[in-house]
Amino acid sequence: MPSIRRWGKSKFERNPESSFKLLAAVLVITLYLLLKEFQHPTVHQPFTTPVGATIQYAQWNGTGKAHELRATKVRDAMKYTFRKYRENAWGYDDILPVSGGSSSSRNGWGAFIVDSASTLALMGLWEELSHSIEHILGIDFDTAENPVDPFETTIRYLGGMLSIVDLYDAGLIPEDVLHEEARDLILEHAVTLAEKLAPAYDTPTGMPWPRVDFDTQQGEPSPTFVFSDDPNKREYDHPVIGPARTGSSILENRVLARMTGNPIYAKNSTLAWAPLVWSKWKSPWKGMVDAPIDIMTGSPVGRSRHWDGGHDSYYEYLLKITLLAPQADPHLDVYKQRFLGSAYSLRKHLSSRSAPAPEHFMQHVFIGRQDDQQYQNQQGHLACFAPGTILLASKHYDQPYLRTFSLALLEGCRHVYTSTPTKIGPETWSWTPKFSYDEPFISPLTERQQEEWSQTGFWITDSKYQGRPEYVESLFYAWRITGEQRYRDWAWEAFAAMEEHCKAPFGYAQLADVWETKGEDNWVDMQESFWAAETLKYLWLTFTGVETASLDTWVFSTEGHPFRMIR
Ligand SMILES: *[C@@H]1O[C@H](CO)[C@@H](O)[C@H](O)[C@H]1NC(C)=O
Ligand SMILES: *[C@@H]1O[C@H](CO)[C@@H](O)[C@H](O)[C@H]1NC(C)=O
């Protein structure tokens, strides 16, 4: 087992003359510390007992035990994923699962290692975790070759490290895998990274720049942004940002503020989403934000309004911060009202029932989007996080109506999974809305789409599967909150399909086309770190015992990293 370097503490050399001075000095320091503690109690309380919420189903009667065989199969998939990466791509951000090559598009700090660590910890893969911790302790977050994306870096790297600290503080990582000095160093790394990301928040509104240059310590627009004095040549006057990018750092930074006692992190993240939460712009739909948003003025400069990719985790964090933040936080009620408004707006304006098709009479509820006044009858795989998140809200806020609605949305996601020959859902799909005043924006164009529509009631508009977690994430919430066995079975169906179609010589490949069962020819040589951080984690948590990472005491970040509720 690889061991972690221990940091020896220097011992006092005792001799009789200095012992009186030493005693006096110790006394003075103790008195000073006591006085200081009395005036400013330390916020750093790693071993506080969490104050939980009542989220999980409570009447298991023995049905919440682990399904050992299935849990073991998923854990084996994680071991395989890790071993292949370790043998062939150690230290790079990601392995290429078909060729065995590697890629580094997340600043090269070893994204896979940091992002997968909390999964290893929950699964008890200690040898693997020790090896990862050794790497994490050696990362130099002070320098980055390429501009750093604050959103991706916060959810994958910062969240991954903070989760390890929280899991350790909760007593879930053995001392021979992680000890206190190493835990403190991981937290120091997290602070270093957060400080390097700090220039992101240097805008008049506090909304983050899309990129940060670690050398110049300056915020930057995204690489596609066009600067020009000529209004005809530029799309926007200033850099713009979507709700997810500006609204998905509050959980991580809240946790960092709790662990360090420094409120600046939570403060900056609160300012970052303030123009959305306390928007002066009146969206015609309650709780929803219009995007993109100008980071210099805080005003929307487009009319895109939905819960799909790019907007998703802003809504997710509105809910989850009310589970995570101390109950004394004065904004919790605003967040709750914004979340509930947007969830009911999703139901009223975005969700849509599919019309029956020639060979498929059942109707399904899907999640569409609004772009520039136009309803688009198209859903992305990413939007399949919404059923789980809305179900979580229905329990936390006691909204029975949202429960029924979220489970209907989940059935819609399952339908697209079980309808394809691979039994895996596509990246995006479309349907004919049953009730619509306008002509549907998207119609089946190709012969294949018409065939798909006729058989299933939807047709595929982007046929890839990218190893995404959102469907199985929602199944995890459904299982833990309703206690209904079928959600566990649905998760098993999905995992069996991934095992059959995605398992490649060096990991789990993405698929080019979920409508084809052509084996290796269908593989795409990519494996994103969320495959290990989220997809395998949520699957395993669905099959292991329900007391593991209970939703009553843990909140999962948008990257699947568990944080303790300390309220
Ligand atoms: C457990 O028992 C209670 C009370 O008898 C019952 O209402 C509930 O449905 C049972 N749960 C399961 C999962 O069987
Ligand atoms: C917080 O935001 C301010 C701008 O309002 C910025 O100057 C500062 O560096 C940020 N600090 C951190 C730790 O994010």
Image (spheres, helix red, strand yellow):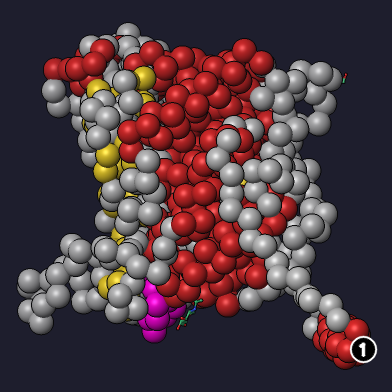
Residue drawn at point x = 37 percent, y = 46 percent: 91
Could you tell me residue 125's position as x and y percent?
Answer: 59, 32
Can you name the residue that lies furthest to the top here?
359
Image quadrant assignment for residue 148? bottom left
> How far from the left and from the top, in percent, is residue 374?
27, 49
285 vs 449, left or right, is right
In-image side of 239 versus 567 (left or right): left
**Quarter occupied by the N terminus:** top right
Magenta stretch encompasses residue 492:
no
Residue drawn at the location 54% of the way across and 69% of the way down:
191
For the question of whether residue 102 can be seen, the reply is yes
Height in image: 141 above or below 195? above
Q: Is residue 450 visible?
A: no
Q: Residue at x 62, y 12 (%)?
A: 69
Reply above or below: 479 against 197: above
Other-residue count near label 1 (Cα within 10 Å), few / some / many at <14 / 14–19 / ≥20: few
Q: Amino acid at mark 1?
A: Phe
- For disc 1, the marked residue is 20
Main SS, magenta region, reads: loop
Camera-nearest residue between 263 and 379: 263
Dot 1: what SS?
A: helix
From the image, which quarter does the C terminus lie in? bottom right
Task: Establish if 89 lies above or below 9.
Answer: above
Segment colored magenta: 199-209
- In the rendered view, tell whether residue 151 sits above or below residue 412: below
Q: Is residue 208 magenta?
A: yes
Disc 1 within 8 angstroms of ligand 2 (CB):
no
Residue 332 in percent (x, y) is at: 67, 65
Residue 233 vs residue 412, the one in the foreground: 233
Q: Give the left or right position of residue 252, taking residue 551 as reference.
A: left
Q: Residue 266 sits in which quadrant?
A: bottom right
